[in-house]
Image (tube, rainbow, N blue to C red):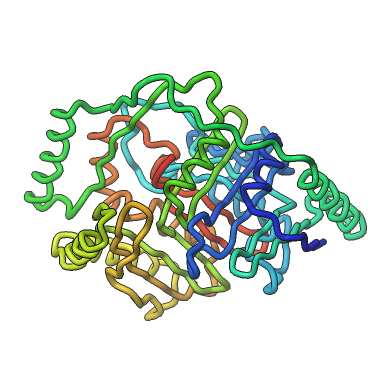
């Protein structure tokens, strides 16, 4: 591995330097949260692309025989790498999105009636170079692994050459951020007001009948974009208005994904697992006294506490499938976290990953997150497919990375 520390550069400035490069991934801790928003990562030009479509995994266009999760595990195992603890955790590996509809590779679920944009269930790129940012200490590095070169000497040479390439890209004059231009048409929902009210009433009826405890029913909004729409300008505007600790911009050919999420789905640090489900939200007020009153109202809400506790129980069960016995704990239940426009109730569930389990096993046990499905999870996903009718695709899936060293971190993708 070749590591080169750079003079501090703001991540969005670096983003403008690489925005034109293929398969750009920007994992952005835009909120600057002391605990949750310490690191950001920027990368592009992968040496491999893993796509899951209709349950079939392919890498660089060639279909693989393995079941998709096992295939991804096997691909990552080709590039073993030790973690350097003095650097930010993502030091090369797979990064991209796991779409919500990947749930059908894990459970027997109905196929939504309307396929949406017909996107892959997952796109994960294999990155040999990562630019990492430590916001706490205002430091940044180019981390270059030299993969996929297998010969040690040639791998070292490739690592230095690739670091030179990325440093040269960052040194080029940066285009000024474009002006964000809005959509060319109005936002349209896949529900009418009456049909959405009817959908909610149906879910309430299923709850009263004892079929489920909760289900997270969503609307899909769409709009036409103007010919001059600039995705980078849009994302910079988004992070300014709604900074979040787990934000992301992915530019994969014709597909661009912008996400601004406060919720960590999964983090694996060594053998320690953490998930931070959010249930319970209230809008903030510009008036400080009213804002405080709203936070107190949320903290005292029996309904929101009940929803949050149900998902905590679901995640405790999910983690128990891959964690050592008696290690799953809830160090925080319904704590308050405040962001630019909302207050949230957030819980923390932790565990110790069992010795025979890994990051892929953890993802399989927990995906998709309970906070964006409901409880029980499988029944709520059946109801979601029937009521929403549109495939969710990237929405309510996860964005994140799985390091070559086995370190894994994903966040629930709430806005795209």
Q: Position of residue 9 (x, y in %)?
A: 69, 55
Residue 325 is left or right of residue 255, and the answer is: left
Residue 182 is left or right of residue 406, and the answer is: left
Residue 287 is left or right of residue 168, and the answer is: left
Seen in the picture, residue 272 relative to 110 is either above or below; the reply is: below
Q: Quadrant of the C terminus?
A: top left
Residue 104 shows in this picture: no
**What is the quadrant of residue 141 in the picture?**
bottom right
Q: Between residue 138 and residue 358, name the one nearer to us.
A: 138
**What is the quadrant of residue 345 in the picture?**
bottom left
Q: Position of residue 89 (x, y in %)?
A: 63, 65
Residue 44 is left or right of residue 39, and the answer is: right
**Residue shown at 56%/30% (left/top)?**
230
Q: Between residue 111 and residue 372, name the one nearer to us.
A: 372
**Residue shown at 62%/41% (left/top)?**
50
**Residue shown at 37%/70% (left/top)?**
349
Q: Position of residue 332 (x, y in %)?
A: 33, 74
Q: Between residue 144 and residue 407, name the one nearer to us.
A: 144
Seen in the picture, residue 276 relative to 196 is either above or below; the reply is: below
Residue that extends furthest to the bottom in the rendered view of this protein: 326
Task: Report how many numbered discs are placed on residues in the image.
Answer: 0
Q: Quadrant of the N terminus?
A: bottom right
Q: Position of residue 118 (x, y in %)?
A: 46, 27
Q: Between residue 377 and residue 8, name the one nearer to us.
A: 8
**Residue shown at 52%/40% (left/top)?**
235
Residue 98 shows in this picture: yes
Seen in the picture, residue 25 relative to 194 is either above or below; the reply is: below
């Amino acid at each position: 591995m070749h590591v080169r520390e750079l003079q501090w550069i703001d991540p969005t400035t670096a983003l403008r330097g690489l925005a034109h490069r293929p398969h750009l991934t920007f994992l952005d801790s835009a909120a600057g949260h002391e605990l949750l928003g310490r690191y950001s990562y920027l990368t592009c030009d992968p040496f491999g692309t893993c796509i899951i479509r209709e349950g079939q995994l392919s890498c660089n266009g060639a279909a693989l025989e393995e079941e998709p999760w096992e295939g991804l595990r096997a691909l990552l195992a080709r590039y073993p790498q030790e973690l350097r603890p003095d650097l930010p955790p993502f030091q090369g590996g797979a990064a991209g999105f796991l779409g919500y509809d990947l749930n059908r590779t894990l459970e027997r679920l109905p196929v939504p009636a309307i396929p949406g944009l017909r996107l892959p269930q997952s796109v994960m790129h294999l990155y040999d170079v990562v630019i990492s940012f430590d916001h706490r200490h205002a430091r940044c590095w180019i981390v270059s692994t030299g993969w996929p070169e297998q010969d040690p000497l040639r791998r070292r040479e490739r690592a230095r050459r690739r670091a030179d390439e990325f440093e040269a890209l960052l040194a080029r004059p940066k285009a000024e951020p474009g002006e964000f231009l809005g959509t060319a048409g109005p936002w349209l929902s896949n529900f009418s007001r009456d049909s959405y009210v009817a959908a909610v009433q149906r879910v309430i009826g299923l709850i009263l009948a004892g079929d489920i405890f909760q289900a997270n029913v969503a609307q899909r909004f769409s709009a036409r974009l103007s010919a001059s729409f600039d995705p980078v300008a849009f994302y910079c505007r988004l992070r300014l208005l709604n900074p979040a600790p787990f934000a992301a911009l992915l530019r994969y050919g014709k597909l661009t994904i912008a996400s601004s999420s406060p919720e960590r789905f999964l983090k694996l640090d060594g053998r320690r697992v953490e998930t931070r489900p959010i249930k319970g939200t209230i809008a903030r007020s510009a008036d400080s006294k009213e804002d405080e009153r709203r936070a107190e109202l949320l903290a005292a809400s029996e309904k929101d506490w009940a929803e949050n506790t149900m998902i905590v129980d679901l995640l405790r069960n999910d983690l128990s499938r891959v964690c050592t016995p008696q290690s799953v704990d809830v160090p925080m239940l319904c704590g308050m976290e405040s962001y630019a426009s909302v207050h949230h109730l957030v819980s923390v569930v932790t565990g110790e990953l069992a010795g025979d389990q890994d990051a892929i096993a953890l993802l399989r046990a927990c995906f998709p997150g309970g906070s964006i499905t409901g409880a029980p999870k499988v029944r709520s996903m059946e109801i979601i497919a029937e009521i929403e009718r549109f495939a969710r695709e990237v929405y309510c899936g996860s964005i994140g990375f799985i390091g070559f060293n086995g370190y894994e971190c994903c966040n629930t993708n709430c806005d795209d």
